[in-house]
Amino acid sequence: MRNILFFPALIAAGILGCSPSPNDNTQLNTNIPPQFYRNISTLYGAGYPVAKDSTGFLKASDIQWKDSLGVSHSLVNLKDTIIILNFWATWCEYCTYEMPDMQAVSDSMGKYGVRVIGVSIDAGNSIFDLVKEYVKEHNISYQIVIDPKETTYLNYHGGTGIPVTFIIDRQGNISTKFIGQTNKKDVIEYLYSIL
C-alpha cells in the first residue's frame, strides 16, 4: 500500500487547496427534486472516525445518504467496488479545476468497477440549489453527497483543506489519498495498480 502525497499536508492545503469555512450546523436539506435523486443527495448518519483495524489497515468510515425517493445508500453496500471519495465545495477554485478530471475518471473507469463519489462541504440556507446549479454548469454525472455539517469530512481528513481525495479498495481499506488538486492521469495510474 503506497500513499501519494505531492506536498506535505500544510503546504498542500495552502498551495493546492482551499480552507473550509466554519461549520454553521445547518440543517440537512431533504427537499430534493426527483430528477436529481441519482446524482445529488444529502448525507445522514454521523459515521465514525477513520481508524486502523486489527490487521493494521486504515478502514474507510461508512457514508450514508438517501435519494429523493427515500432509498438509503452507503459505502458499505458498494461491495467489490473501488471508490474514489473526493471532498470539495463550490467556493473552492482548486475543486473547480479538478472537477473535469474527476468526471473523466468516472467516465473511463466505471467499467472496471470504480465509482466516484463527491462529498460537498457547502453550507448555508440554499445548499441543494447551490450544488445543483454547480453540478449542472460543470456537467457532473457522478454521485454527489452534500455534507453541510462536515461530519464525514472531519472523520476522514480533520478539516485541513480541500480538495482531498481518498481511494478506497474493494475490501473497504483506504488505499491512498491525494492531498490538494489532483488530475486524471495520476488517479488512473494509481487505479490500474490496484485493479
Image: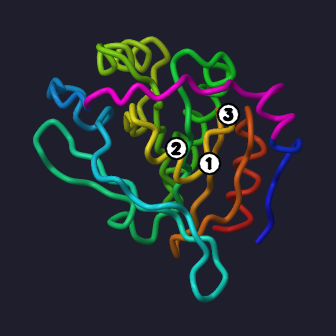
Crowd band around label 2 with a 10 angstrom C-alpha radius: few (<14), some (14–19), many (20+): many
**What percent of the width, then of the height, locates residue 77?**
32, 66
Residue 18 colored in magenta in the image: yes
Q: Which residue is mark 3?
A: 161
Q: Is residue 69 above or below residue 193?
A: above
Position of residue 52 in the picture relative to residue 123 (left or right): right
Pointer 2 with pointer 1, Cβ within 8 A: yes
The local secondary structure at tag 1 comes to helix
Position of residue 170 in the picture relative to residue 195 (left or right): left
Identify the disc placed on residue 91.
Answer: none
The C terminus, quarter of image: bottom right
**What percent of the width, then of the height, locates residue 26?**
32, 26
**Residue at 77%, 32% in the rendered image:** 13
Q: CA distance from mark 2 to mark 1?
A: 6 Å
Q: How many marks?
A: 3
Q: Main SS of the magenta segment?
A: loop
Identify the disc placed on residue 153.
Answer: 2
Magenta segment:
10-27
**What percent of the width, then of the height, locates residue 47?**
38, 58
Q: Nearer the viewer, residue 166 or 127?
A: 127
Q: Amino acid at mark 2?
A: Tyr
**Residue at 32%, 34% in the rendered image:** 39
The local secondary structure at tag 3 comes to loop
Q: CA distance from mark 3 to mark 1?
A: 8 Å
Identify the disc placed on residue 157.
Answer: 1
Q: Is residue 169 above or below residue 17?
A: below
Q: Amino acid at mark 3?
A: Gly
Residue 163 colored in magenta in the image: no
Q: Nearer the viewer, residue 92 or 21?
A: 21
**Residue at 83%, 49% in the rendered image:** 5
Q: Of marks 2 and 3, which one's residue comes earlier in the chain?
A: 2
